[in-house]
Amino acid sequence: MRLLLVNPNTNVRTTALMAGIARAAAPAGVTIDGATADQGAPLILDPVMLATAGDAVRSLLGATDLTPYRGIIVAAFGDPGLDGARALSAVPVTGIAEAAMAEAATHGRFAVVTTTPLLADAIAARAASYGHAAVFAGVWLTAGDAGSLMADPSRLEDALEAAIRQAMAESAPDAVIIGGGPLAAAAAALRTRLAVPIIEPVPAAVALALHRGAAT
């Protein structure tokens, strides 16, 4: 089976990172290609950038031959352009927030920890739109500038851990989603330290995309 992972921001290094995460999560025999938006921003930080990323996803898919693929993954946590992508594609399209929230909800109440405060309302709206309002505990944020944290893996890991521990203390969620596609390395490290299931969006999306692709 072949999947296409679409990065809605313009950072090709982020595309390569997320495609690598996806390939590591996929079983043998699955091919995952990466594609990068050619318009927008290198890091999606606010609702305007999120909307622009949605346009970029639709533009990219509209210009891509999708016939080789059994599934498409929209790999930004706000799932930008997801509905429009589904209108353009004859194969299933999966958002990483959609998949992560579905997996987290199987544990019960879940929190999202992320680096982008201006997207907290959009994340909450996504949770509600996917039917998880009753089990959505809220968004907890890392301290510090998102761009600076992303450039320093050690600081990023520490900031995510602090935010997760705050969420655990304040809300006692049954699972925590690391709200960002390129954060898997930090998520894997934190999983060994924390007494709560840590959900990684890209691997969750791979699993859901493969399930959907097998059903078509």
Image (cartoon, helix red, strand yellow):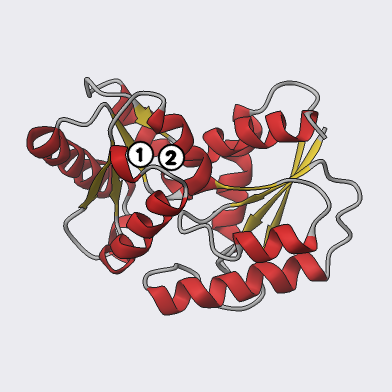
Identified by mark 2, the residue type is Met
Name the foreground residue: 185 vs 138: 138
Name the foreground residue: 135 vs 144: 135
In the image, taking residue 73 as reference, residue 184 lies left or right, namely: left
**Callout 1: SS:** strand
Name the foreground residue: 39 vs 70: 70
Q: What is the tally of numbered marks visible in this picture?
A: 2
**In the figure, residue 174 lies in which quadrant?**
top left
Q: Where residue 138 sits: x, y (%)?
A: 24, 48
Q: Quadrant of the C terminus?
A: top right
Q: Which mark is residue 101?
A: 2
**Callout 2: SS:** helix
- Regarding residue 86, the answer to whether it shows in the image is yes
Q: Residue at x 67, y 37 (%)?
A: 209
Q: Nearer the viewer, mark 1 or mark 2?
A: 2
In the image, taking residue 202 as reference, residue 34 lies left or right, namely: right
Name the foreground residue: 16 vs 38: 38
Q: Where residue 73 sits: x, y (%)?
A: 65, 48
Q: Where residue 178 sits: x, y (%)?
A: 36, 42
Q: Mark 1 and mark 2: span between their CA atoms?
A: 8 Å
- Regarding residue 151, the answer to whether it shows in the image is no
Q: Which mark is residue 79?
A: none
Q: Residue furthest left?
A: 169
Q: Do callouts 1 and 2 mark residues in contact (Cβ within 8 Å)?
A: yes
**In the figure, residue 145 lies in which quadrant?**
bottom left
Q: Earlier in the sequence, mark 1 or mark 2?
A: 2
Q: Residue at x 22, y 20 (%)?
A: 195
Q: Residue at x 54, y 34 (%)?
A: 203
Q: Which residue is mark 1?
A: 177
Q: Residue at x 53, y 34 (%)?
A: 204
Q: Quadrant of the N terminus?
A: top right
Identified by mark 1, the residue type is Ile
